[in-house]
Image: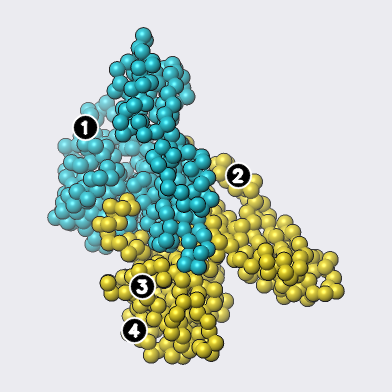
Chain colours: A yellow, B cyan
Amino acid sequence: MEKIRIGIAGYGNLGRGVQYAASQNKDMEVVAVFTRREPSSVQTVLPVRVERMEEMEKYAGRIDVMILCGGSATDLPKQSAQIASLFNIVDSFDTHAKVPEHFAALDAAAKKAGTLGAMSVGWDPGLFSLARAYFGAALPEGKTYTFWGKGVSQGHSDAIRRIAGVKDARQYTVPVEDALRRVRSGEEPELSVREKHTRECFVVAEEGADKARIEHEIKTMPDYFADYDTTVHFISEEELLGEHAGIPHGGFVFRSGRSASGNRFLMEFSLKLDSNPEFTSSVLVAYARAVHRLSKEGKTGAVTVFDIAPKYLLPEDAAAQRKELL
Amino acid sequence: MEKIRIGIAGYGNLGRGVQYAASQNKDMEVVAVFTRREPSSVQTVLPVRVERMEEMEKYAGRIDVMILCGGSATDLPKQSAQIASLFNIVDSFDTHAKVPEHFAALDAAAKKAGTLGAMSVGWDPGLFSLARAYFGAALPEGKTYTFWGKGVSQGHSDAIRRIAGVKDARQYTVPVEDALRRVRSGEEPELSVREKHTRECFVVAEEGADKARIEHEIKTMPDYFADYDTTVHFISEEELLGEHAGIPHGGFVFRSGRSASGNRFLMEFSLKLDSNPEFTSSVLVAYARAVHRLSKEGKTGAVTVFDIAPKYLLPEDAAAQRKELL
């Protein structure tokens, strides 16, 4: 079998996850990892060639799909379009407000280069987006709800770390059980931000720091915490590293709706993930397969999960899919 | 807005459901219902023209998609290919063992006529098939489970009705709570048929009938009941009509899997449906939209849910989908 040749651009949690995920797919091989660090300093989880980002161009024609493993804040807005001028790409761009401009830039670059780029792939955006789309199509009259957690929010953890006197922190987003129960009951409640999620913070304070002030600064932080019921626990560094080292996440998408005759329906999709980046990586790899195949069919430009038929994601051919999965 | 012109072939529970569902989609109109009965005898749930099946041909060019609402046992094996020679179609063919031959016949007829036919649309096969496909793609190493219920199985209810001395019956398929719990725990159990579902039967016996014999005949019926823990309740006709008149259903698709580094993941999709046929109908209608659009793009032949990108299912254009759902 001719393997799909994968490149990994960026080698943090996501890049390592992509390498692991590709190893579970027999029709793929990872050709190289590209990094901004000194290649010899990078320890990979499985053996692979490590190159400088600037060497990427030399791999044109030797990599079928480049999986972009940088962040949405500063990396992807530059990299996605740029790398799409050389390779088919998949990225996990998740800055929702900037989706239209990211799409436009990627679409233009990819069309010009004759490549294909799938953006905003992962679980949210990604599989959760798919649930919202399929659920909405199946039940045009109804209400869609998305809940996240219980899981670690990197952005909120970072926000706490920026407070003076904080040495380290981990923030969990937790869906409110009563809100889940009300949605499942079919009552279609209107839920405020506060009613949907709580925020639980585990904070390591620097020696002698004013804990009351830190707690107050967290709880009143606009956008991040002020609109939520927030709990702050001060713990030791050992406890943080011991009990809160993982990056679990998950969540729920619901659609509660009804037929024209008044019958009620509830659709629910949920994820429980030991590792947020490793699951995201696994989805990125499945979409890399789809991008490779669609590109071979002549498709170019930018696409999202909405544009890709499920058949492209699986290694089995269509007849086998109908036999085993339909 | 130019509306998608829908025809309904067959007017039982599913046909009525399609009429209701189409009324919830502003971009659709139902042009006519086609029936094998005397048209004047058919009471429709909303006003619509009712025609004899044989009149269908006269509607060529006036209906964009015909939604087939017959049964998989005898209707669809004949109708799907036949009607696809005149119209684009959607059907809910669910005889799993005969999927390959149904696909081949529909594909040949539709390609010859230049039409498009989507087969096996609904929730299982249909949305549950999609869950199995997406879940399997996201987690190549893991185990997929499908559970059905709690809900009424028409086939099992009919099987009980064929027993001598039975006046009427309703059979519920019930997933075993402990099996659901074990799957959710991530242990990836091997589950026998008996461990996954129980069968609960509500039976109205004819006067003077031997209830012990009826119960024995139910519980030992091969394929239908012998492999399950089955409970039989004898009730009055009033109770059956009063408490068991609905056709609820639902179920669960799980995938439990792990990354190459050993992190564990659980994916779960579930449905809770007051009315099985009305939900199936609602999915059929969404796929009719997709069939209409793909047909306009020039696509012909047979397709399943695996072949259709989600964007085709929704009335909103791609930019609106990215903005609102991604």
Q: Which residue is mark 2?
A: A181
User: In the image, is residue A8 above or below residue B157?
Assistant: below
Q: Amino acid at mark 2?
A: Arg
Q: x, y (%) of residue A67?
A: 44, 76
Q: Which residue is mark 1?
A: B36
User: How far, Cα to Cα, is label 3 from label 4?
Assistant: 13 Å
Q: Which residue is mark 3?
A: A28
Seen as rendered, the residue at the extreme left is B112
Q: Is residue B30 left or right of residue A262?
A: left
Instruction: Please give the chain letter of the residue carrying mark 3.
Output: A
The answer to whether residue B197 of the structure is visible from this angle is yes
User: How far, Cα to Cα, is label 2 from label 4?
Assistant: 51 Å
Q: Are marks 2 and 4 in contact (CB under 8 Å)?
A: no
Q: Are marks 3 and 2 in contact (CB under 8 Å)?
A: no
User: How far, Cα to Cα, is label 3 from label 2?
Assistant: 42 Å
| Numbered circle sitting on residue A62 | 4
